[in-house]
Image (tube, helix red, strand yellow):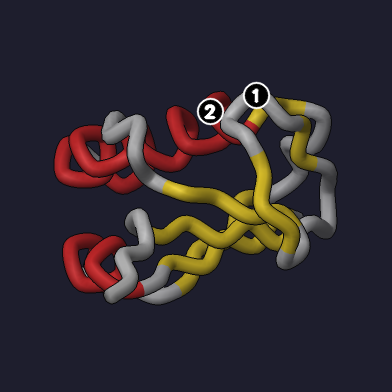
Amino acid sequence: MIQLVFFASVREQLGRSKYQVAHCGGITVDELLTLVAQELGENAANLFADANLLVAINQEMAARTDKVNDSDEVAVFPPVTGG
């Protein structure tokens, strides 16, 4: 099972902080987000289409082309700004 964790505006727009996906390891982050968007609907699809969203796999920054394995935690969050 893959655990997705949503932060900041991503969490607010989806109305949830977590989502679990059963047994779909070996796919890319992009494929995972596409699968989740199909389950969560158009709002999620529009949100995940944003190329500026950041992802981390098991608390390490990742690219959308990186593979996700069963039991991984995938965090999704907006770009971080500083000042």
| CB-based contact (under 8 Å), mark 2 and mark 1 | yes
Locate the N terminus and report the quarter of the image it occupies.
Answer: bottom right
> Between 10 and 52, which is closer to the camera in this rendering?
52
The correct choice, above or below, for 28 with respect to 57 in the image is above
Residue 54 position within the rendered picture, expressed as x and y whole percent measured from the top left: 47, 49
Q: CA distance from mark 2 to mark 1?
A: 6 Å
Secondary structure beneath label 1: loop
Q: Residue at x 55, y 50 (%)?
A: 55
Q: Picture quarter containing residue 72?
A: bottom right
Instruction: Give the crowd class for mark 1: few <14, some 14-19, many >=20 residues within 10 Å.
Output: few
Q: Residue at x 47, y 37 (%)?
A: 33
Q: Which-is-in-front pick, marks 2 and 1? A: 1
Q: Picture quarter containing residue 24?
A: top right
The correct choice, above or below, for 11 with respect to 79 in the image is below
The three-letter code of the residue at mark 1 reads Thr
Give me the disc on residue 30: 2
Residue 13 position within the rendered picture, expressed as x and y whole percent measured from the top left: 18, 63
> Between 61 and 30, which is closer to the camera in this rendering?
61
Residue 50 position within the rendered picture, expressed as x and y whole percent measured from the top left: 28, 34
The three-letter code of the residue at mark 2 reads Asp
Give me the disc on residue 43: none
Give me the disc on residue 65: 1
Residue most extreme to the front: 83
Q: Earlier in the sequence, mark 2 or mark 1?
A: 2
